[in-house]
Image (tube, helix red, strand yellow):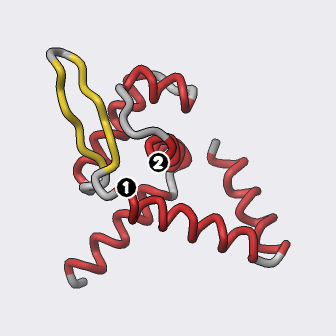
């Protein structure tokens, strides 16, 4: 598999994780957040959020800056990430009711 295709498949895999997806949505709505803020925003433990953020860092989707002992995360390519989220939303909105029902069922079984 070529490098570009591999990286795209990794990104899709991460977006398939409901917690990871929620974190990216939250960061798309907010410029920078620390893990505690993200944890409250997605209703998951800081430990879980930190684990997911590490995966997003490896995928080069998020960056972080430290201020003393506190880390603040932001999207590395915010405009492009928002475009992807918008395209996904538009796809779901225009998809047939059968596909929407299937996707909702998948989301309910993985939450």
Query: Residue at 64% of width from left, 64% of height from top?
Result: 89
Confirm or deny contact between disc 2 and disc 1 (CB under 8 A).
Answer: yes
Query: Residue at left 57%, top 26%?
Result: 43
State the mark number for residue 66: none
Q: Which quadrant is the C terminus positioned in?
A: top right
Left or right: 65 in relation to 47: left
- Residue 58: horizontal and vertical position, in percent? 22, 51
Which residue is farthest top?
69
Describe residue 83's horizontal placement relative to residue 101 as left or right: left
Taking 83 as reference, is 110 above or below it?
above
Q: Which residue, given by chain and number where applicable, does mark 2 sit on?
A: 28
Q: Is 87 left, or right, of 71 in this rendering?
A: right
Q: Earlier in the sequence, mark 2 or mark 1?
A: 2
Q: Give the residue pinned by disc 1.
A: 78
The Cα atoms of the two marked residues, 2 and 1, are separated by 7 Å
List x then y, in percent, for residue 30: 46, 39
Binning the other alpha carbons within 10 Å of mark 1 as few (below 14), some (14 to 19) or many (20 upward) gives some
């Amino acid at each position: 598999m070529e490098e570009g295709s591999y990286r795209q498949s990794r990104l899709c895999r991460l977006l398939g994780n409901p917690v990871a997806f929620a974190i990216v949505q939250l960061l798309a709505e907010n410029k920078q957040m620390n893990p505690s803020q993200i944890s409250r925003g997605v209703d998951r433990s800081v430990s879980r959020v930190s684990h997911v953020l590490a995966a997003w860092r490896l995928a080069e989707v998020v960056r972080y800056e430290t201020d003393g002992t506190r880390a603040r995360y932001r999207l590395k390519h915010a405009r492009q990430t928002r475009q992807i989220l918008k395209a996904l939303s538009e796809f779901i909105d225009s998809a047939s009711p059968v596909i929407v029902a299937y996707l909702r069922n998948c989301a309910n079984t993985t939450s």
